[in-house]
Amino acid sequence: MKIKKDMHHIHDKSYKDLFSNKELLVKMIQNFIESPWGKEINEDNMELVNKSYILSDYEELESDIVYKATIGNKEVIFYILLEFQSYVDYSMPIRLFLYISEILREILKNTKKIEAKSKEFKLPAIVPIVLYNGEYKWTVEKKFKNVINQSELFGNNIIDFEYILIDINKYEKEELMQLKNIVSAVFLLDQKVDVEEFISRVKDIAINFNSLTEKQKMMLRHWLRMTLNEEIKDKLGENIEDILIAKKEEVEVMTSNISRTIKETFEQTREEAREEGREEGKVEMAIEMLKDGEPIAKIAKYSKLSENEILELKKKL
């Protein structure tokens, strides 16, 4: 039984909604990216750029976020390009190159020509980050020059950059549990686990992530509601996401009810499979007896199928 929806663009859109919140992006960078600049950024010196740089060729498939940040008294401005990815895509370095080019083109377009041509003019740094939550190992080249044919011949004479990869499924559960913040909660619930473990994680977050604000709980609940598979919602008969905003004394009851439903669903599915197997056995027996020329009444007696069912089988032979 799949926990999450298959449509990657819905999942990516949900991530975009989450990380359009500056607080979440800052937490992710500070907790999951080791870099000097990551320690310098905060909500006050960051600004969400209200524009997408995705080209028309990709607009139905992708979702990006761009932030502008200022560091220090000298106003060192740089851009953070965050791209969400649900499957392995070997064109990622090329796509990021196109995004970076579009951002720089926009910056130059909005800069006075005399300023852009001056010796002192500097372009802002653009840091590409890929957030990956897919099932398969990410084997895409991280350096741009590695997707250029025979790049080793040209050394430093060709363009190069390396994007930062955050692979959600590479983190250990214990590592994420220790952080106890909204980003680690999202990663915990988006890792590829079975249903029982998923429910256990929802419970752990509801009980142990005490630093989550009411606003963050509502954001997490909304994200979960958007990404959960409709089939699993129907089968469990509970709004799993509501556990996240329930009172602690209610959490145990809610998760116990869901666990019981999971067990009952499993038993029902197993019994249905057994019954299906028994029916297939009856049909196979009837077919063999028909091939042997046995009378209908005798076949009905031994196969436990009705004579009408046997006659229908006979028509198909």
Image: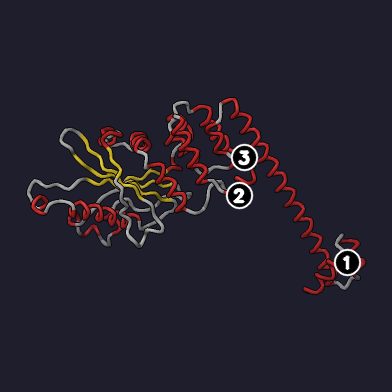
Q: Tell me which residue sits at (56%, 36%) in the image.
A: 242
Q: Is residue 18 above or below residue 177?
A: below
Mark closest to the chain's N terminus, 1 or 2: 2
Element carrying mark 3: loop
- The amino acid on which the numbered mark 2 sits, given as a three-letter code, is Glu
Q: Quadrant of the C terminus?
A: bottom right
Residue closer to the observer: 316 or 84: 84
Residue closer to the observer: 289 or 222: 222
Estimate the spatial distance between the alpha carbons at disc 3 and disc 1, rounded to whole Å. 44 Å
**Few, some or many residues within 10 Å of mark 2 (<14, 14–19, 20+):** few
Say which residue label 2 marks: 231
**Few, some or many residues within 10 Å of mark 1 (<14, 14–19, 20+):** some
Estimate the spatial distance between the alpha carbons at disc 3 and disc 2, rounded to whole Å. 12 Å
Question: Residue 33's x, y, as percent?
Answer: 33, 38
Say which residue label 1 marks: 307
Say which residue label 3 marks: 238
Mark 3–mark 2 contact, CB under 8 Å?
Answer: no
Estimate the spatial distance between the alpha carbons at disc 1 and disc 2, rounded to whole Å. 38 Å
Question: Residue 91's x, y, as percent?
Answer: 35, 58
- The amino acid on which the numbered mark 3 sits, given as a three-letter code, is Glu
**Few, some or many residues within 10 Å of mark 3 (<14, 14–19, 20+):** some
- The amino acid on which the numbered mark 1 sits, given as a three-letter code, is Glu
Circle nearer the viewer, 1 or 2: 2
